[in-house]
Image: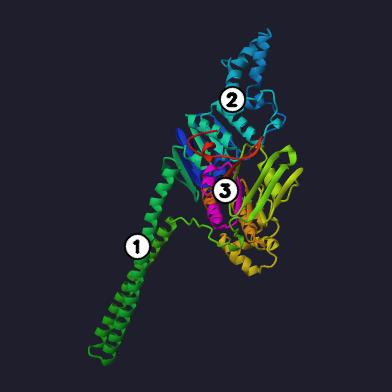
Amino acid sequence: MTCSSLSFAWPDGSEVFDSFQLSVGPGRTGLIGLNGCGKSTLLRLIAGELTPSSGRVATAGDIGYLPQNLVLDTTLRVDEVLGVAAKRAALSAIEAGDVREEHFATVGDDWDVEERARALLGQLGLGGTGLDRTTGELSGGECVLLRLAALLLARPAVLLLDEPTNNLDLYARRRLYDAVDAWTGVLVTVSHDRELLERVDRIADLRDGEVTWYGGSLSAYEEALAVEQEAAERMVRVAEADVRRQRRELADAHVTLARRRRYGQKMWDTKHEPKAVMGQRRRTAQESAGRYRIMHTERLADAEERLGEAVDAVRDDEAIRIELPHTKVHPGSEVLLLRDVRLAHGIRVPGEWDLRGPERIALVGRNGAGKTTLLRTLAGELAPASGEADTRVPVGFLPQRLDVLDDGLSLVENVARFAPGATANGIRARLAHFLFKGTRADRAAGTLSGGERLRATLAALLLAEPAPRLLMLDEPTNSLDLSGVGRLTSALDAYEGALVVASHDMPFLMSLGITRWLLLDEEGLRVVDPGLLPGGGSAEA
């Protein structure tokens, strides 16, 4: 699959690609890059969903594409999504005795198409999904797996996956990983899922409209990048020293020329030589001084250019660094209590559960188990149908939808809603710690990317008055790139209160220093060994 001289701009004129080149061979490729760099746009161009302004995409076969925000017609049957409905109908007609040639032409060589479809659904954990069910009866994660099953059944030459694990629980992710492992054609996936990226053969790093290739998985990429960055930082130090040296030499040159001018003027004033000779000597000296000055100026300019190139090679992966002393929870102090709770939608949490001190809780479970409902109940957004669900400290809740901010207000104004006693300058100073510096703090919330919006929402929650001493996050990494996940982790490192995180991202959870893992399922809430969860260790549930 190749992209040749590909150019694309949005209707507002913002350019994404200019004469972009890409060539991808068989194997699994992980496409990474900062939010907004054009990863999803590139997949849409390759898939034919967008038309380039110039250039072309060429593939040795057809393309299968799984978009990030999958929308399926809820009236479609499962067999229609799988693309086997017509063949099923033809097979049924033949079995009923209708032997018209058109039915045989429809079936072709796919006499076992229904068996293959059911087997593939079983491999992806959809074994109980009948081919006659509609997609409206399926969850979002099941729809993603169904669309993946359709792609695998079609066996395209090129398979494109855009953040395929975003809506999948731990168990569904494991099924997708297995499918990726078994793929033998060309596969390109955009993802921030570390476990998925550990299964690729190469990493394509998209930055500033160009791709840099790294052989191996994400770990190999990070090791190679660390070596590159160490060398780049060393080159910056060398270039800085060269610039300082050239500036000294230029300053010394000015002193030398000034000394020569004074000597020449003295010789002119005392008239020790004929005027014509002295005039020629002065002109020669001036020309020599000019060349001398130009030489040192050019050397300085060259040194500064090399410094600029060296600085450009160093990546500016800023981290969130902030102190949050007002979020501190003392060990043993009561934070929340659950007693025989029945949540909305009939979800039950029997028994008594409490959280004390600065615990860090990972809340895991299948899609639809009720994790979001439980968090919304603890946040006070939903009332329990029965039982007791009490929080004893100020709460901050980061919802999956990230709809906490007012899109029409600036970031400063949004934070002021949560901290009415803070001054505008004080808010700006705190926002700078969350990487919203200078005029970035004046941007309207509605203009932010997904990763920026999460960072801004987190800032508003953590800077609130009173400060939250229980912070609850619902699938916080879904809209983040790899660097964004790192920034979120660094912000949570500074948080001193109790933390409850619902997530399917095992590497992210493992990085948080989780003290207790709670599994929510049809039996209620129970402590679980993370090693028994998919992706949590050698054993699998």
Q: Position of residue 12 (x, y in %)?
A: 63, 51
Earlier in the chain: of badge 1 and badge 3, it is 1
Above or below — where is 285 with respect to 4?
below
The reply, left or right, for residue 390 in relation to residue 51 is: right
Earlier in the chain: of badge 2 and badge 1, it is 2
The residue carrying mark 3 is 480
Q: Secondary structure at mark 3?
A: loop
Mark 2 residue type: Gly
Mark 3 residue type: Leu
Mark 1 residue type: Val
The residue carrying mark 1 is 238
The residue carrying mark 2 is 122
Name the foreground residue: 423 vs 212. 423
Q: Secondary structure at mark 2?
A: helix
Q: Tell me if mark 3 has few (under 14), some (14-19) or many (20+) residues whose alpha carbon lies within 10 angstroms of its own.
A: many
Q: Tell me if mark 1 has few (under 14), some (14-19) or many (20+) residues whose alpha carbon lies within 10 angstroms of its own.
A: some
Distance, label 2 to label 3, CA atoms, is 31 Å
- Which residue is found at the position 54% from the left and 26% from the top? 155
Name the foreground residue: 451 vs 48. 451
Distance, label 2 to label 1, CA atoms, is 59 Å
Above or below — where is 432 with respect to 32?
below
